[in-house]
Image (tube, rainbow, N blue to C red):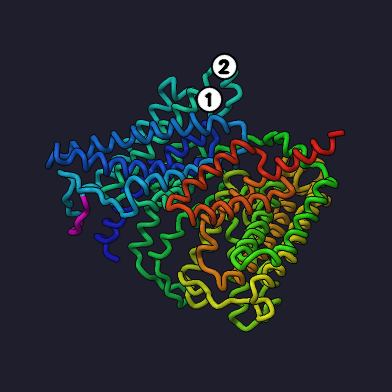
Amino acid sequence: MSLASLAVQLLNGLASASSLFLIAAGLTLIFGVTRVVNFAHGSLYMLGAYVAWSVGRALSPLLPGTAAGFWIATITAALAVALIGALIEVLLLKRLYAAPELLQLTATFAVVLIVRDAALAIWGPDDRLGPRVPGLDGAVSILGRAVPQYDLLLIGVGPIVLIGLTWLIRRTRFGVVVRAAAENRELTAALGIDQARLYTAVFALGSFLAGLAGALTLPRVGANLGMDLAVIADAFVVTVLGGLGSIPGAFAAALLIGIIKALCIAAGTVDVAGTTIAMPKLTLVIEFIVMALVLMLRPTGLLGAAPALHAPPLSAVERALVARPARVQAVVAIVLVTAGLLLPLAGDTYTLVLATDILVAALFAGSLQLLTGRGGMTSFGHAAYFGIGGYAAAIAATRGYPFVAALVVAPFAAALAALAFGVICRRLSGIYFAMLTLAFAQIAWSIALDWDSVTGGSNGITGVWPPAALADPSHYYLLVLAIVAPALVALVVIAFTPFGYALRAGRDSPLRAAAIGIDVGRRRIKGLFLSGAFAGLAGGLYAYSKGGIGPDSLAIPRSVDALVMMLIGGQTAWFGPLAGSAALTLLQDTLSRTTEYWRAWVGVAILALVLLFPGGLGGALGTWSRRLRRSP
């Protein structure tokens, strides 16, 4: 590796870091003040690129051969996205500030689905490549290598924005109010600050930065429909790695990630203990590895402060669901199982396959409910255990193990992976724990994608089918029902064991739980172990139902699906996993066969469910059953 090559790659990494900082800075501002984990921030970034492309195309005949059109398009796009962000906050999020944070996450994920299909309808499926910027379309020779002039511009934008934001936060009244709200929202409200206007202004500013980043990225990457989810994970990593609420921390983290990625590309291939490693492939996951290492050593990130140790109050639905299941729930469970047993008599093959998918998804969502709803450990990467279980069963099947043995391997493999992860991250909590789960899932996804000799690489493992006696869809459905129904009951029973009560105590008040002798860290590790086992079992059943497994089973969308199903069903509701999985699976299946823009309609349906049933569908069922018991 020559010095010239290294210098060029470092400059390229700094340009990428500057763009990433703009996105992460907006996300940091929004989370620091509103405490909303804005999953739609990547969509705002995407809209910035598309709007800049449209405005630039319209201005090119009017301002030919000058850079004025580019800058007008860039500022216009950023302002337009700021307005869109403010509308999202006013029309949607303002109604959800009193709701649990995960419910807000679900709402912003619904916005992602709506915005993506809106972009598809307006701009079409093709990539929109940005034009070269007049005056910045050449290259500068550095150590004999050509470096694009535009990259040098981007390198300078990051520090300028950092200086501007630092001045705004440290030297203006608006900044004083923002810092006060970030540290203590209740006291800020008591002092007479209009929080509604403040939240809208902060959301608009964060959206402006996201739109600006998208517009500035257009000449390098172009606008495409996949850039929203592609960038949001990196933005979360930078935000958490730098320290929540810290603008300088986000800048330092973006630089760190950009430089390390550049070094991986420049290194090419290296030999470690006789094994050749293609370093450029590490760019898919290196930021997650760096974040995991930093959080294990410094749980609050590079420049983050320790969060306040207090537990959020339980909602009315959550308080009610602390009680044991009543007779009504038992009757409903018996009716559901009976209907499930009779389904093969009335349903066709397609219905049975869809019902199998719902049951597998219900077990997956139930495993997450145990971890997040009961234990308070939010997981953004729960698909890791689902995918590990699926791969374990598929690998065992291809090695000649019988069906039962391969299926038994699935929960054990996933549980061991969850146990190892729990030991590593026992010091973390809140969003830092959630982001480390995302890092673990992305690392597992990268391994599945690149380990061709074992996992089949991008093609996955195929040819994994149940034995002849279970080949008929009705037979396999009944087997899944016979496994999933007791597993879902077991998840409810666990909540009322001494372990379950201790897990809930650690969720509601870790300090009080520790004061009465509960080892909160150990209980959380056990919760991870059990949750991983149930998720792995769901993954094994999924692999046999689909005839194989692929890297998408460990990807971010799979984890998001589990979160959405859990929250639609109810974070602590007894029938929540089944209700949530049925609602989401049926919505996706019905709408995908009806319209090209089915994602948008799924998003609208999710928003309706979130607004109408903040306690989830299962929570609504629990409320109905309690009213029924009280009625004469």
Q: Residues within 10 Å of mark 1 (few under 14, many from 20)?
A: some
* Inter-mark Cα distance, 1 to 2: 10 Å
Secondary element at image label 1? helix
Work out which residue is located at the far top of the displayed protein and give it. 192
The numbered disc on residue 191 is: 2
Report helix, strand or loop for mark 2. Answer: loop
Looking at the picture, which amino acid does disc 1 mark? Ala
Of all residues shown, which one is farthest toward the bottom? 400
Q: Is residue 610 above or below residue 205?
A: below
Between 75 and 177, the one nearer to me in the picture: 75
The stretch drawn in magenta includes residue 120: no
The tag on residue 180 is 1
**Residue 91 shows which numbered tag?**
none
The crowding category of the residue bearing disc 2, from other C-alpha atoms within 10 Å (few below 14, some 14 to 19, many at least 20), is: few
Q: Can residue 296 be seen in the rendering of this structure?
A: no
Whether 440 is drawn above or below 191: the answer is below
Disc 2 residue type (three-letter): Leu
The rendered magenta stretch, by its main secondary structure, is classed as strand
Residue 561: horizontal and vertical position, in percent? 56, 53
Closest to the observer: 622 or 152?
622
Decide if residue 407 is on the left or right side of residue 559: right
Sequence-earlier tag: 1 or 2: 1
**Highlighted range, magenta:** 143-148
**Badges 1 and 2: C-beta atoms under 8 Å apart?**
yes
Residue 371 is situated, as x and y percent measured from the top left of the image, at 68, 51
Q: What is the count of numbered marks? A: 2
Q: Residue furthest right?
A: 632
